[in-house]
Image (cartoon, rainbow, N blue to C red):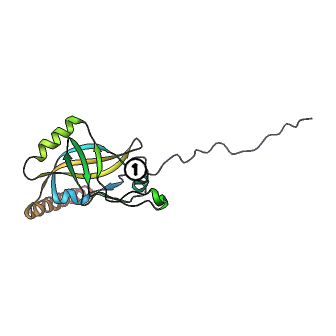
Amino acid sequence: MARNQTQLTQPNKPKNVKRDPVASGERDACVNRAASHDFFLLERYETGIALRGTEVKSIRAGQANLKDSYGLVKDGELFLLNAHIGAYAPGAQFNHDTLRTRKLLVHRAQILKLHAAIQQKGLTIIPTRMYFKGGRVKVEVAVAKGKQLWDKRETERRRTADKEARDAIARSRKS
C-alpha cells in the first residue's frame, strides 16, 4: 500500500542570479585612467577584440592593463599594441603571450575614419576601457591629442573649481 507523504519544504527561494559584475557588464574590466590625464579624447568608438580563450578568462579575473597601449591602422585593419593581459594560471601550456598584438574588430567605414584622423599631426588612437557586453569583450578606443604640461594644469584647475562649486551648492542646501 502506497503512503501519501507530504514533504515540508520551504517555498522556492530566489537563487542569486546576479553574475560577476565584470562579466555582466555592470563594471569595466579595466580602465585606462592615464588616457584622460595625458590626452584630449576627441572621438570614441566601440570595438570588438579578437582574443584567445585564456585571455578572456584573465580579463574576467581582472588581469588586464591598458596603460601604455595604443592603436595602429595597418593594411586596412586596426590593431591594439602593448595591451597587457596577464597569464591565466590554470592555462598551463595553452596560455597566451601577455603583450601580443591583438586585432580590433570594427566596420570598414570606421577604420577609414580612424585612419584619416590619425594622419593629422599629433593625433593617435588610445584604448580607454575594456568591458563585457553581451558576453563579449569590447574595447573603447578614442582618437586622442596629446596634452602639454600647461594643459594638464588647466584641466586640474578646472576640476578643482568645479568641485568647490559643487561643495558650495551642497553647503547652501544644508543650511
Q: Secondary structure at mark 1?
A: loop
Residue at the spot 77% in from the left edge and 42% down from the top edge: 7
Q: How many marks do you count on the picture?
A: 1
Residue at the spot 42% in from the left edge and 43% down from the top edge: 135
Q: Label 1 crowding class (10 Å Cα cut-off): few <14, some 14-19, many 20+?
A: few
Indicate the quadrant containing the C terminus: top left, top right, bottom left or bottom right.
bottom left
Residue 66 locus on image (x, y percent):
28, 57
Residue 147 locus on image (x, y percent):
11, 58
> In the rendered image of this protein, does residue 136 appear above or below residue 99?
above
- Nearest the camera: 159 or 45? 45
Residue 131 locus on image (x, y percent):
35, 49
**Residue where numbered disc 1 is placed:** 52
Residue at the spot 72% in from the left edge and 45% down from the top edge: 9
Residue at the extreme right of the image, as rendered: 1
| 91 displayed left or right of 63 | right
Q: Within the image, what quadrant is residue 3 found in?
A: top right
Residue at the spot 20% in from the left edge and 43% down from the top edge: 75
Task: Mark yes or no: residue 175 visible.
Answer: no
